[in-house]
């Protein structure tokens, strides 16, 4: 781990320790928050008992589908918009204000169209994640060095080889950023949708625990989500660094 990584870890550890002390000393009331150590103990007990397995599997499945659709769809749409200048200019204002749209206001309409089930939840997760991937795909393709594109034309490379050997490697940092944002937004969209109108899933379980003043279960599931998203983003970060190092060599 680099020095910067150790500094980040120390900051996170200090913050967790501070919350632990505030909870243990009563500065933060028991009805407001339980100590992080108690969250970890409750999460371990919850996972060991298997009570939350079905909810976890359902939520992760929905997030995986929403994420895959966001990345693939966002890349295709971003590449298409990048290649059609007039269409891109027309769509740019909508992309800039996209996240101001209250997607959850359309949830009843989505339920009426797709029915109760995972489809509306996955669609909301997709709608949250896809634009992040579109924007980063466009930004990445914008930053491909022109000299490399001219070299490709001089060498007689066809569009497919140019895309695979020049455009994608050059745009890789932005594509990874888009993927990391897409996974975070997919989690947000899916879990928030489960809060509203779902009878299962992690979001529903958190809302149910909140409504029944079950702080231990609520914070345990929240800790699970935070830890999982952190691990996934760390994996993407390590993968990105290895690819960038390989490209540098």
Image (spheres, rainbow, N blue to C red):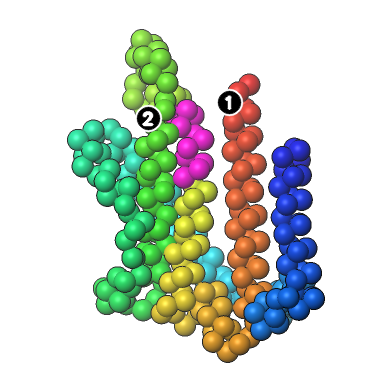
Residue under numbered circle 1 = 247
Foreground of the two, 71 or 10: 10
The x and y percentages for residue 85 are 23, 33
Q: Which mark is residue 46?
A: none
Residue 50 visible, this orientation: no
Which SS does the magenta portion mostly show? helix
Check the picture and name the quadrant holding the N terminus.
Answer: top right
Whether residue 35 sits left or right of residue 132 in the image: it is: right
Whether residue 120 sits left or right of residue 210 in the image: it is: left
Whether residue 37 sits left or right of residue 124 in the image: it is: right
Q: Secondary structure at mark 2?
A: helix
Graded by Cα atoms within 10 Å as few (under 14), some (14 to 19) or many (20 or more), the crowding at tag 2 reads some
Check the picture and name the quadrant holding the C terminus.
Answer: top right
The reply to whether discs 1 and 2 touch (Cβ–Cβ < 8 Å) is no
Q: What residue appears at the point 40 percent right and 39 percent down from the top-left corner?
A: 137
> Quarter-wise, where is residue 5 in the image?
top right
The x and y percentages for residue 83 are 28, 33
Foreground of the two, 28 or 43: 28
Foreground of the two, 216 or 187: 216
**What's the CA distance linking mark 1 and mark 2?**
19 Å
Foreground of the two, 18 or 178: 18
Q: Is residue 171 magenta?
A: yes
Tell me the magenta residue range.
Answer: 167-178
- Looking at the image, is 175 positioned above or below residue 66? above
Between disc 1 and disc 2, whose residue precedes? 2
Residue under numbered circle 2 = 142
Graded by Cα atoms within 10 Å as few (under 14), some (14 to 19) or many (20 or more), the crowding at tag 1 reads few
> Quarter-wise, where is residue 212 in the image?
bottom right
Which residue is most to the top?
154
Mark in the foreground, 1 or 2: 2
- Looking at the image, is 27 positioned above or below residue 90? below
């Amino acid at each position: 781990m680099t020095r910067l990584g150790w500094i980040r870890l120390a900051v996170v550890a200090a913050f967790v320790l501070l919350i632990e002390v505030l909870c243990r000393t009563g500065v933060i009331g028991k009805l407001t928050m339980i100590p992080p150590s108690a969250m970890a103990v409750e999460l371990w007990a919850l996972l060991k008992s298997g009570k939350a397995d079905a909810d976890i599997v359902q939520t992760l499945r929905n997030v995986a589908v929403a994420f895959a659709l966001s990345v693939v769809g966002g890349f295709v749409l971003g590449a298409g918009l990048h290649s059609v200048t007039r269409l891109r200019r027309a769509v740019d204002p909508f992309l800039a204000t996209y996240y101001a749209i209250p997607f959850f206001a359309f949830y009843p309409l989505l339920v009426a169209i797709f029915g109760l089930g995972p489809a509306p939840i996955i669609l909301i997760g997709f709608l949250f994640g896809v634009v992040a991937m579109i924007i980063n795909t466009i930004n990445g393709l914008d930053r491909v060095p022109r000299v490399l594109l001219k070299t490709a034309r001089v060498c007689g490379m066809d569009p497919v080889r140019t895309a695979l050997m020049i455009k994608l490697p050059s745009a890789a940092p932005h594509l990874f950023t888009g993927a990391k944002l897409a996974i975070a937004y997919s989690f947000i969209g899916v879990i928030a949708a489960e809060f509203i109108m779902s009878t299962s899933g992690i979001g529903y379980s958190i809302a149910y625990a909140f409504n029944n003043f079950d702080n231990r279960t609520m914070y345990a599931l929240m800790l699970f989500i935070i830890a999982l998203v952190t691990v996934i983003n760390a994996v993407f970060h390590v993968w990105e660094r290895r690819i960038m190092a390989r490209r540098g060599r």
